[in-house]
Amino acid sequence: MVCTCHKESGVERKDIPENDVLITSEDPVHPANLICELCRNFYNNGWVTGTGGGISIRDGDKIYIAPSGVQKERMVPENMFVLSLNSKNYLRTPEIYKPSACTPLFMSAYTMRNAGACIHTHSQNAVMVTLLFDKVFEISSIEQIKAIPKITEPGNLWYSDKLVIPIIENTEKEEDLTDSLQEAIREYPQATAVLVRRHGIYVWGETVWKAKIYNEAIDYLLELAVKMKQLNIPTVKEKI
Amino acid sequence: MVCTCHKESGVERKDIPENDVLITSEDPVHPANLICELCRNFYNNGWVTGTGGGISIRDGDKIYIAPSGVQKERMVPENMFVLSLNSKNYLRTPEIYKPSACTPLFMSAYTMRNAGACIHTHSQNAVMVTLLFDKVFEISSIEQIKAIPKITEPGNLWYSDKLVIPIIENTEKEEDLTDSLQEAIREYPQATAVLVRRHGIYVWGETVWKAKIYNEAIDYLLELAVKMKQLNIPTVKEKI
Amino acid sequence: MVCTCHKESGVERKDIPENDVLITSEDPVHPANLICELCRNFYNNGWVTGTGGGISIRDGDKIYIAPSGVQKERMVPENMFVLSLNSKNYLRTPEIYKPSACTPLFMSAYTMRNAGACIHTHSQNAVMVTLLFDKVFEISSIEQIKAIPKITEPGNLWYSDKLVIPIIENTEKEEDLTDSLQEAIREYPQATAVLVRRHGIYVWGETVWKAKIYNEAIDYLLELAVKMKQLNIPTVKEKI
Amino acid sequence: MVCTCHKESGVERKDIPENDVLITSEDPVHPANLICELCRNFYNNGWVTGTGGGISIRDGDKIYIAPSGVQKERMVPENMFVLSLNSKNYLRTPEIYKPSACTPLFMSAYTMRNAGACIHTHSQNAVMVTLLFDKVFEISSIEQIKAIPKITEPGNLWYSDKLVIPIIENTEKEEDLTDSLQEAIREYPQATAVLVRRHGIYVWGETVWKAKIYNEAIDYLLELAVKMKQLNIPTVKEKI
């Protein structure tokens, strides 16, 4: 008699097609798994509903990107594109999906800032701020600012430092944002994010966790700024 | 000695009554299972609390509809009605429930637009918009608009296109909405949704996933529009 | 060799103390279990945070009530009080807790209205409405009103019917509300709920599910009414 | 033949390094486990996003504190610092983390008030209230006030009592708040919380559950106060 219980509870190792090796791992923080988990988190925050937004993670030369037009909270690792940062060639292409229109924007964060991950959301707080501010979003003297890095020097902003995030104009097609996004990245070397008018925000960081933390902290500040504007409280506090 | 562990972890296949074959499946995306899952999602979004709202999915000739007056987040497949699109006869009737008053409205989306699913919510964003707009809801130049289809031609709206959703007047009984809903569907061939004043919204799509995506994207736009109105920002942007 | 797996996955039946028979059941809808589940739902809605609010369910002569001052989302069946409706005696008293101050208020719904359950929340929508309305809360011509029963005749309100919920003044001690609550119940025979100024709401129904549905539908209407007031939209629509 | 199922479902007991004994327990309410659970709860409430905020629990002489700059919803017991209240020495230091900048602030609650736990959040309601009130936050005649203790005498506040929470000015570095926090604790012997302008709130209690309940009840009151201010309703009601 053979007890077969372990076959029921265990998962039998199948042969993995060559194309799938890149996205198959039991490690929950493998990029292909983590993208799925973080997108469920973003969905619950209302940042990627209706297939909007996305996230890309870099692992050395390999860039993982979720496809275009998919429900972000229902993604599985098999949906992922994998690109080579150096060759710009696709190392893996899922069967039925097309690449994200955000791809050249994510690549800008990798090539110009050596980012480890880039997050794009349609956060309503981001959209509202672009309707209430002109060329840049500015806020100072809120504790949460201390979660944001200085970029051009080590360490994070201090409490009374002014956080400045450039706002670029939206375009009909997402990929047409690339030039103005790159221009904003050059013009604002201290920025770790770019707002897109009537559209959303791009946030990057040197690791996926830093990108996630910056995105959460910035969204908190955007939400607070909208509330302050509604009560006619200036978002930048004069230093006394 | 016989190891009986598998009996504990496995589910023994019971004989399924003829009436239940239509709603019995281990496939999580079978319409009878998916309606239950999506209704829990809608409940958590506040769209179907207090038994309000509902969803119907079409599978070929078979139309699956949740019953009237049930708690949408506690439904099980056994609660489902199944109708034939062609014969309009009920293929399955659950024991203790009565058919949804939305049935003729869902059927309009199937017969007039060949929809694959239709969602009805009591979203507060939808109700608020019908209190702030007159004959139609209009919004333009918000990125999320690009998730909405053009319907009368292939592809989705562009960023600066104007999304127009007709608003019909509510009636005392839900089924009495049928005429004006059908009139709105005829009059607005580009619409994939109809708002009902002081009531909610109907959204359909050629598949259940498309209907879900459209509903999420439209609700996002309705929520944003209410915020814009409160800050006196026009929802339709003049093209320059 | 004996396979012991089933001992690990199964739960061994322990002898239940006499006092605990009333609250011990594997049925998820047994009142002692359901109170715990619904309180987690209410907690997630912000209705019973900080130990506020509560719920009582009647099963024949047995009244189940959660204790005073406990975290509603962490309750277990062992925490429950059980009272006899007829004798007013406690059939079961948990070891370390004191009876809810809501007890005489819940009992009023049972004795005066033959309720099957009574829900009390500190919903902020309820508190806000009592700051914006005088003697009664009134709303009409919102679809969600159709989830509320007429009470004095069979069936529910129609769309254009006016829902009226009396508002009583708060007192220093919760039990001192009993007289004015009972007076409101007598004075408003059509009410299935009473608002308490600067405090919250009591909602009851002939079954626990009806009470839950009424509470959800009413809270939806309270939330909507606050938004309408903020935009100077009257909550009662003149019939044309 | 040996059935090995139990090896799959059970967890084999490993040797625990000496440093880890303090934070290793299967009891879900052990401080090291409970800090992780409560931080997930706080994260879902938006109180500790972007690594902001934190919590400390005291178990006799042992003070458990989460490290600085970590994602609060992803913490595990191994991340915890453990301090001796008497000796002020670290009994346990996790490998890669640095101590929380809140440490001297948490210690003030332990040494000056004999607290059992102290919670720090970046709640937006707290920040907003510090933008709308001057030296202190005051509210009266809201039922939820009855969840807050009188501190200088036994029992909780009554409904019409005035809850007063001091507001201190923020500093560039969190540890520099210590002096003014201690001054506020001395000056307001009835306070179980201190608000920090443009930053957040510190709340403590004699047990972790009391601290959690006070924090929930206070945040409810802060949220309500912001809504009342927006509608020009005074937060302190004149006694008649």
Image: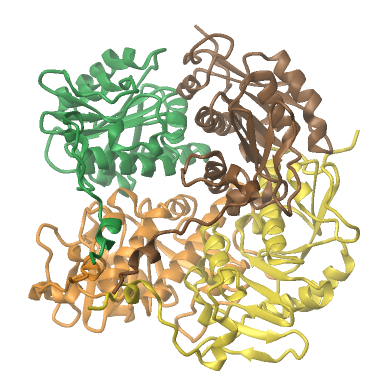
Chain colours: A green, B brown, C yellow, D orange
* Count of all numbered marks drawn on residues in the image: 0
At x 34% / y 54%, what residue is drawn?
D48
Q: Position of residue C213 (x, y in %)?
A: 69, 56
> Would you identify the image quadrant in which residue D14 lies?
bottom left
**For this view, does B194 lie left or right of residue D44?**
right
At x 76% / y 47%, what residue is drawn?
B98
Q: Position of residue D231 (x, y in %)?
A: 63, 48
Quadrant of the drawing holding the N terminus of chain A:
bottom left
**Residue A164 visible here:** no
Q: Nearer the viewer, residue C182 or D187?
A: C182
Q: Position of residue C97 (x, y in %)?
A: 53, 86
**For this view, does D95 lie left or right of residue A54?**
left
Q: Give above or below for A135 relative to D165.
A: above
At x 52% / y 60%, what residue is drawn?
D220
Q: Position of residue B143 (x, y in %)?
A: 45, 22
Q: Give above or below for B69 relative to C172.
A: above
Quadrant of the drawing holding the C terminus of chain A:
top left
**Residue C212 visible here:** yes
Q: Give above or below for B112 relative to C52.
A: above
| The furthest residue to the top | B240
> Would you identify the image quadrant in which residue C169 lies?
bottom right
Q: Nearer the viewer, residue B96 or D200?
A: B96
Q: Nearer the viewer, residue B8 or B206?
A: B8
